[in-house]
Amino acid sequence: MSQSPNETRVDIAALILTAAALILTLVLHLLPALFAGLLVHSLVHLLAPRMFGRKLDPARSRIGVVIVLTAIVLGLTALLIGGATGFFRSEGADLPTLLQKMAEIIDNARTTLPVWVSDSLPTDADALKDQVTNWLREHAAELRKAGGEVGRGFAYALIGMVIGALLAVREIASGRAEGALALSLKHALGLVEDAFSRVFLAQIRISLLNTALTTVYLVGVLPAFGAHLPLTKTMIALTFVAGLLPFIGNLISSSVIVVISLSYSLPIAGASLLFLLLLHKLEYFINARIVGSRINAAAWELLLAMVVMEAIFGLAGVIAAPVFYAYAKAELVSRKLV
């Protein structure tokens, strides 16, 4: 059945508005809010019938899920703040002790470093402290900007969660008839949410694979060469949790593993860095393969989308590329254009 000119105009308007909104999330750095909102909205839809059954009023069941998710988020935030506070107040976690430990690591590494490298390193904790102080003074503006971006991203994510929860509840509570544009926008946003859900489930598989490979390296490969790193279980858990964030999560867990490897020895740190670099590069192809299978896209399609989005929007573009491309392809498929 062919659409009327009015229906066609409404669909085109909805497509333009949806595409503009997605692009603005990258331009205005609102991607954390978008993904957090989509995650909460999807979880409410998924968990409400499973947690409370279908006999309970749908609005009440969704409100119940929202309360549970809110308690989980607040609990995790409290644990994170409490753990960080306890760490920095604990014995041996002060700055002088940390600098002394770093100086000892550097001093132990001098025997394996080339002369031209060791001559440029600080000789003791006081020299290291002076270098750190000078570096902080020179890069104070950049550090303030980076800290502000992290805090802003976290705040946006919390706001996105609230919006996603409110929308999930309002869908049932609202009984007002919706216009043609609203219905078309709801259809488009439903495709965006479906694309996000598919990519998120694929990212869980990718994180499990990264965690398995990292576990083999930390528990199998390194001990085989006599290297037993501390905090192995913590690093494995961090690899899985951080791995739920595409690409940037791999960088976070890799940095922690390299730093802890450096505390053991410089050659082990070098081996860890090489392994994690290879794993990070491999993630591009693993991501394209696994995510592509979830969204019915060939690996080369997703790789091309990731490369183009990274060139335009940087790291945020790489993270958003699978979801945005999955939505674009779903729109084309729904209209029988591909």
Image: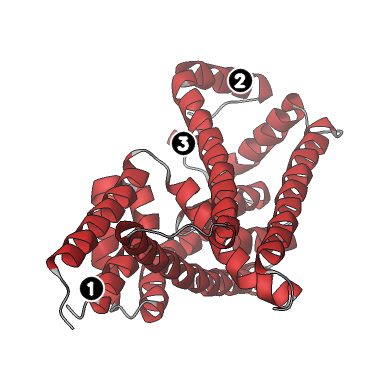
Of badges 1 and 3, nearer the viewer stands 1
Residues at marks 2 and 1, CA–CA distance in whole angstroms: 61 Å
**Which one is nearer the viewer's eye here, 186 or 305?**
186
**Residue that badge 1 annotates:** 332
Q: Is residue 128 above or below residue 180?
A: above
Residues at marks 1 and 3, CA–CA distance in whole angstroms: 56 Å
As drawn, the label of residue 177 is none
The residue depicted at 77 percent of the width and 43 percent of the height is: 78
Q: Mark 2 near mark 3, Cβ–Cβ under 8 Å? A: no
Q: Is residue 190 above or below residue 18?
A: below
Residue 269 makes an appearance in the image: no
Give left or right: position of 216 versus 65: left
- Secondary structure of the residue carrying tag 2 is helix
Of badges 2 and 1, nearer the viewer stands 1
Quarter location, residue 330: bottom left
* Few, some or many residues within 10 Å of mark 3 (<14, 14–19, 20+): few
Residue type at tag 3: Val
Give left or right: position of 184 versus 50: left
**Residue that badge 3 annotates:** 117
- Secondary structure of the residue carrying tag 3 is helix
Quadrant location, the N terminus:
bottom left
**Which tag, 2 or 1, sits closer to the chain's start?**
2
**Residue that badge 2 annotates:** 127
**Which tag, 1 or 3, sits closer to the chain's start?**
3
Residue 74 makes an appearance in the image: yes
Residue type at tag 2: Ala
Q: Position of residue 221 (x, y in %)?
A: 61, 72
Q: Residue furthest left?
A: 5
Display colour scheme = secondary structure
The residue depicted at 56 percent of the width and 42 percent of the height is: 159
